[in-house]
């Protein structure tokens, strides 16, 4: 949630200080909210079952795992007609990628790895927690932090300037040995896997240049933000750095975003 803190501090205030939780829209498709969960769960189970060499029928086994994870959701027409064919295409792409990567000497260390790192702040210790979708080891013995994305992937510029700090902070945590069972070691790669199952079933975006510097910058930026917000006089403004102006946040109506952004009048 550090990215939300950077982009929309008021959302953090409303959620964690006021204790408000958004309600689901009345016309929400319950299946849509499950898509990312389903993909993550299927891939996690597959990787946990086959952390080393893949069997000859790996694609069939991933599809079988997918059927189990999809479960009763497959009875919904939209899931059966739209999601499942996409998952099958995604399975083919994912297994092919895994074969090539493992043949090159990469290995799986952990999936859904939880970590915790303490930071000193003026108001006391700040606890940074995170969960990495996956942590691999490279042929050189360094780490690769992998994030599965079923939605949009941040640009390299957004990562490097600190507006999308999730993987950068996970890399800093991994380098410090903050993930259980994984000793501290350098992080060589931060990888986004965009998983859509569409015309382009999957896409790999690798950030391998200057990973240590980007991770350290993200951690330093977080430390400065902790110090800033430890001051009770620091406000929690709304939409400080939104990714897109058209995006609508869960708490925009409470922050009176439309009213304040209407403009056109004299102060």
Image (cartoon, rainbow, N blue to C red):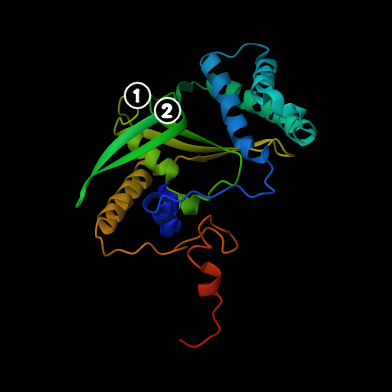
Q: Residues within 10 Å of mark 1 (few under 14, many from 20)?
A: some
On-image quarter of the C terminus: bottom left
Q: Position of residue 76 (x, y in %)?
A: 76, 32
> Residue at 78% across / 30% down in the picture?
80
Q: Residues within 10 Å of mark 2 (few under 14, many from 20)?
A: some
> Residue at 72% across / 38% down in the picture?
198
Q: Position of residue 99 (x, y in %)?
A: 60, 21
- Against 253, residue 101 (above or below) is above
Tell which residue pokes out farthest to the bottom in this image. Answer: 266
> Residue at 34% across / 64% down in the picture?
235
Q: Along the line of sight, which residue is nearer the eye, 194 or 14?
A: 14
73 relative to 223 in the view: left or right: right
Quadrant for residue 71, please give it.
top right
State the SS at label 1: loop
Total marks in image: 2
Quadrant for residue 199, please give it.
top right
CB of mark 2 within 8 Å of CB of mark 1?
A: yes
State the SS at label 2: strand
- Against 204, residue 26 (above or below) is below
Q: Position of residue 186 (x, y in %)?
A: 34, 32
Residue 162 shows up from this direction: no
Quickly name the residue at label 2.
113
Quickly name the residue at label 1.
182
Question: Of marks 2 and 1, which one's residue comes earlier in the chain?
Answer: 2
């Amino acid at each position: 949630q550090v990215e939300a803190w950077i982009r929309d501090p008021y959302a953090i205030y409303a959620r964690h200080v006021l204790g408000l939780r958004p309600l689901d829209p009345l016309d929400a498709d319950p299946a849509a909210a499950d898509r990312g969960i389903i993909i993550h769960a299927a891939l996690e189970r597959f990787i946990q079952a086959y952390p080393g060499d893949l069997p000859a029928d790996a694609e069939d086994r991933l599809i079988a795992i997918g059927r189990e994870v999809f479960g009763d959701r497959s009875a919904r027409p939209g899931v059966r007609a739209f999601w499942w064919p996409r998952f099958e295409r995604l399975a083919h792409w994912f297994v092919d990628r895994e074969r090539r990567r493992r043949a090159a000497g990469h290995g799986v260390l952990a999936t859904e790895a939880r970590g915790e790192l303490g930071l000193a702040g003026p108001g006391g210790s700040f606890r940074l927690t995170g969960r990495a979708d996956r942590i691999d080891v490279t042929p050189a013995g360094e780490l690769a932090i992998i994030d599965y994305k079923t939605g949009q992937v941040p640009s390299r510029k957004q990562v490097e300037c600190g507006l999308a700090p999730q993987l950068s902070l996970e890399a800093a945590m991994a380098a410090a040995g903050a993930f259980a069972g994984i000793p501290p070691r350098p992080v060589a790669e931060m990888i986004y896997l965009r998983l859509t199952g569409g015309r382009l079933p999957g896409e790999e975006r690798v950030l391998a240049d200057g990973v240590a510097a980007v991770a350290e910058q993200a951690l330093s930026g977080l430390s400065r933000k902790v110090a800033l917000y430890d001051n009770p006089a620091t406000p929690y403004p709304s939409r400080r750095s939104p990714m897109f102006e058209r995006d609508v946040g869960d708490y925009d109506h409470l922050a009176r975003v439309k009213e304040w952004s209407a403009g056109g009048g004299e102060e």
